[in-house]
Amino acid sequence: MNNTIKPIIFDLDDVRNKAENGDKFACYILGRSYDSEENGAEQSFEKAMYWYEKGKELGDARCAYGVGACYYFGDGVEQDKGKAKQIHIEAYETLLELINKEKENLRRQAFSKFCLGAYYYFGFGNIEKDVNKAFELIHDCAMQGHLPAIYDLGANFYYNGIGTEKNLKLSEYYLKMAANAGLPRAKAKFEQYKNTYESEIEK
């Protein structure tokens, strides 16, 4: 277990101010915050889509990924998987370039890598679904403090044995870390899984 992970939490007002002034990364973080109820934001798919679209117009591949994901799941817009696929295909190469460009700043790179992990997890664009590759990418992001990735390790990958061996101890460890960092869905999921942890983990 890695005790050196420091979950990254953003100040929503600061992010909003930067996004309003044309900061592409801030547009993505603000979109995600509304999309997934992160950094103290109340969930609003409409606001998420607004900021993703704004960032996409500024040329941000993470925001384009977010727009595509909204169409894929029908969050804040009418579901359109064909449109989602086209957007994800168009954003893919730019996303890879961004990941390469950010290799000197791993904590920033984690936000781009997380999007790539979703490509492999869901099979977005022309990418063939590969949960092992998705796990590797999401795990890398979590080690850099990417809070949604920490949550995904605990709530999904280790709990269900997706892309890795099932490990309830690690599931509990990462889910508790995400819950302690203030992620609402992590707190709810931890309560949901608590009985399983108590009955199946050897103390």
Image (cartoon, rainbow, N blue to C red):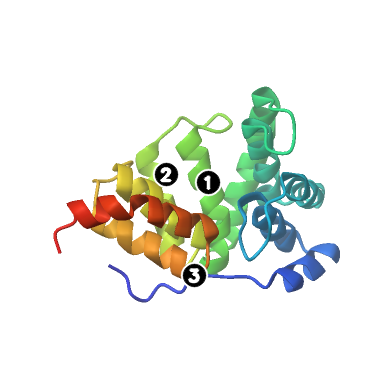
Left or right of 154 on screen, residue 66: right
Q: Residue at x 79, y 63 (%)?
A: 19
Q: Give the crowd class for mark 3: few <14, some 14-19, many >=20 residues within 10 Å.
A: some
- Amino acid type at circle 2 is Ala
State which quarter of the image contains the C terminus. bottom left
- Amino acid type at circle 3 is Ala
Q: Which mark is residue 181?
A: 3
User: How far, Cα to Cα, is label 3 from label 1?
Assistant: 24 Å
Q: Position of residue 103 (x, y in %)?
A: 53, 64
Q: Position of residue 158 (x, y in %)?
A: 31, 50
Q: Nearer the viewer, residue 102 or 16?
A: 16
User: How far, Cα to Cα, is label 3 from label 2?
Assistant: 23 Å
Q: Earlier in the sequence, mark 3 or mark 1?
A: 1
Return the residue found at the far top.
Answer: 82
What element does badge 2 sit on?
Answer: helix
Q: Which residue matches tag 2?
A: 134
Give residue 23's quadrant in the image. Answer: bottom right
What element does badge 1 sit on?
Answer: helix
